[in-house]
Image (cartoon, helix red, strand yellow):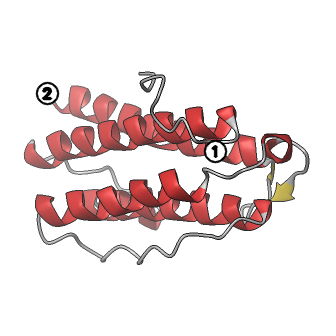
């Protein structure tokens, strides 16, 4: 899963570099899993959380969260937060989704290149859901988020078989 040794070699913070590359892999893997769920006709179980109302809502949650994580982290580190358009409520097709994800992940790569290694764990801030996070911890959360939801989809697909 690791990036090539020269991939993002200009990064100041090795932790940021590693987490950006890992997030990219995990978000793309989630999207592959999401597509298999969609193509297989998976219907999500009814729950109160609106992010699980449908596969389209779950996808919107995932790309919206990825957009939030990088923006929040950059703002806390005093970096220029990337300007990333909000995702559409529903992606018209796979090409539109792929184009959005390409822009989103390119913004991740560019935005965190100058993060100071010392600042990654120097301070913590409260996330909107009330938990304290350092920049490093928020980026780790961003890596695990698509992993967790891909795991959930895999389990639901296995049960549906």
Q: Is residue 48 above or below residue 13?
A: below
Residue 10 image position (x, y, % from top left):
57, 41
Viewer-side residue, 137 vs 39: 137
Indicate the quadrant containing the N terminus: top left, top right, bottom left or bottom right.
Answer: top left
**Disc 1 from disc 2: Cα separation:** 34 Å
Label at residue 127: none
Q: Residue at x 66, y 32 (%)?
A: 14
The quadrant in which residue 130 appears is: bottom right
Furthest residue toward right: 122
From what the image shows, is residue 118 above or below residue 82? above
| Residue 107 placement, left or right of 42 | right
Tell which tag, 1 or 2, sits nearer the viewer.
Answer: 1
30 in relation to 51, above or below? above
Q: Residue at x 71, y 65 (%)?
A: 79
On the question of residue 138 being in view, the answer is yes
- The mark that comes first in sequence, 1 or 2, is 1
Residue bearing the label numbered 2 = 161
Q: Secondary structure at mark 2?
A: loop
Determine which residue is flagged by label 1. Answer: 139
State the SS at label 1: helix
At x 50%, y 39%, the residue is 8
* Residue 81 x/y as whole percent: 62, 70
Is residue 47 among what the camera can see? Answer: no
Residue 125: % across, % down? 85, 58
Report whether 35 appears left or right of 53: left
Q: How many marks?
A: 2
Q: Quadrant of the C terminus?
A: top left
Comparing 99 with 97, the one in front is 99
Task: Judge left or right: residue 31 versus residue 124.
Answer: left
């Amino acid at each position: 899963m690791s990036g090539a040794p020269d991939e993002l070699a200009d990064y100041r913070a090795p932790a940021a570099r590693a987490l950006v590359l890992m997030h990219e892999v995990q978000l793309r893997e989630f999207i592959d899993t999401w597509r298999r769920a969609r193509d297989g006709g998976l219907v999500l179980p009814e729950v109160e959380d609106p992010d699980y109302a449908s596969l389209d809502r779950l996808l919107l949650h995932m790309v919206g969260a990825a957009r939030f994580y990088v923006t929040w982290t950059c703002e806390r580190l005093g970096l220029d937060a990337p300007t990333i358009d909000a995702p559409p409520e529903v992606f018209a097709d796979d090409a539109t989704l792929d184009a959005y994800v390409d822009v989103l992940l390119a913004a991740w790569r560019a935005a965190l290149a100058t993060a100071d290694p010392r600042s990654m764990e120097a301070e913590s801030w409260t996330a909107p859901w009330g938990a304290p996070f350092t920049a490093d911890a928020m980026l780790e959360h961003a890596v695990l988020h698509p992993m967790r939801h891909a795991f959930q989809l895999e389990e639901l697909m296995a049960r549906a078989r």
